[in-house]
Image (cartoon, rainbow, N blue to C red):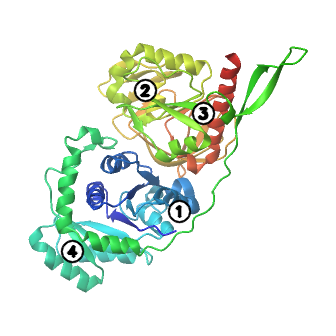
Amino acid sequence: MKIPRFLIAAGASGSGKTLVTCGLLQAYLNRGRRIASFKCGPDYIDPMFHSQVLGTKSRNLDSFFTGEEETRQRLIENAEGYDLAVMEGVMGFYDGVAGISTRASAYDVARITDTPVLLLVNCKGMSVSVAAYIEGFMRYKEDSHIKGILLNQLSPMMYDRMKTMIEEQLSIPVFGYIPKVEDCILESRHLGLVMPEEIDDLQEKLKKLAGILEKTVDLDGIEQLAGQAPDLEKMETTFQMKKWSVSQKVSANTSSNTSSTISLDMNQVSDPNIRIGVAKDEAFCFFYEDNLQLLKKMGAELIYFSPIHDEKIPEKLDGLLLNGGYPELYARKLGENKSMRQSVRDMLTGGLPCIAECGGFLYLHDQMEDKEGTPYPMVGVISGEAHYTGKLSRFGYITLSEGTAFGQNVGPMPAHEFHYYDSTNCGESFLAEKPLSKRSWRCIHTSDTLLAGFPHNYFYGNIKLAEAFYEKCVEYRRKREDET
């Protein structure tokens, strides 16, 4: 399959990758291109900025979660039918798992997907040293895939001379520069960037930046480079999708006038879709779009609701997703919404299947403190208190093992943690182990209907988790149909 593509990488975090990527996305959109965007690694927030520009959903590419073959398939599936795929790197170009390997780095994704890389170089405080800096990145790995350079925070007066020097000394094309744009800076927060909705006039700022890039960056040249990316082989499928059915008791129209149980395909019942509620508002906003799409493929209808603004969770749900986000910033509002908290508690104690991750896990506690230490009541399904630590409590990739999900042994699950909050009751159901490290700890609360803890899961990292959750939703639906 032909997928024109390129990856924006940098030597370190804070080099301007997200801003430049969004500017390029907007510039190509202005040219009428159909764009698929991707973020390397487990990040939630950068894809939101991509989506804000594109008006469509951005996806993640993470080789720790999915390995080589599935990472390629995620790219192929989500880029098919688009004119251009634009990927944003993670951290420094070669920075990967455990801080001592290139696994799951931007380089790793470029290598696995055979994607040309544009190295974004922050030139602030450098001149000739920029050439040595670039050469080091090019030579560190023979298959670096670095095919071009973008110079960031460079004075227009210096560009022609810097471009000539780099191209003559290193034989690599420089595709342009980005001057410092004072009113197009993305701010930071404790979990990364602020949310797109929090930046005033974001669209206008990005359109301004795109206009600048039209003048300072060789967009035609980058697109030609993207078009030279090798074809990728599309697999028919990377896993076997199961078929689910529900059983429904009906009165048998027979002489004995007895009842019988029949098995019905989901497409034969009055409402064929499994209804999964998804918490989504200012407090709960971290989603892997591929997770949601996979549930839809399995037959789910996703019902969005707000734990902050709605009075109760939607009716006739068969499952519930409480994802991460910033619930600590809205602890008072969440605590004051007593009817919502009560409805969530009633449904979960009544057996509604639920996955609660990080912020969603905090919401299920007896109480949660805001950053100032003021406690507020939460749902009360998890006995314990959630509190702010002032530092990263646990951070990075982990592998979960020794536990069951919704009553099933699903095997090892790759996951990721990143949180400044901790709990007095993190759970003991799984063993979390850091890769390339001896560090491990127990975590997560599980039952036949609940999986709740700090780790974030990407379903394509272990399809069995999604299947176990969905099967439990089908079982719950079956009981709901029987009761009615």
Disc 3 versus disc 2: distance between alpha carbons?
35 Å
Disc 3 versus disc 4: distance between alpha carbons?
59 Å
Disc 1 versus disc 4: distance between alpha carbons?
36 Å
Instruction: Identify the secondary structure beneath mark 4.
Output: helix
Q: In this figure, which residue is indicated by the disc labeled 2?
A: 386
Which residue is rendered at x = 38% and y = 71% of the image?
226
Q: In this figure, which residue is indicated by the disc labeled 4?
A: 129
Residue 359 makes an appearance in the image: yes
Q: Which quadrant would residue 179 be assigned to in this image? A: bottom left
**Residue type at tag 2:** Ala
**Local crowd at mark 4 within 10 Å, few (<14), some, or many (≥20)?**
few
How far from the left and from the top, in percent, is residue 45?
36, 45
Earlier sequence position, callout 1 versus callout 2 = 1
Which quadrant would the C terminus be assigned to in this image? top right
Q: Is residue 388 left or right of residue 403?
A: left
Earlier sequence position, callout 3 versus callout 2 = 3
Instruction: Identify the secondary structure beneath mark 1.
Output: helix
Disc 2 versus disc 4: distance between alpha carbons?
48 Å
Instruction: Point out which mark residue 351 bears.
Output: none
**Local crowd at mark 1 within 10 Å, few (<14), some, or many (≥20)?**
many
Q: In this figure, which residue is indicated by the disc labeled 3?
A: 273
3 vs 1, front mark: 3
Earlier sequence position, callout 3 versus callout 1 = 1
Q: Do the numbered discs 1 and 4 sit on residues whose CB atoms are within 8 Å?
A: no
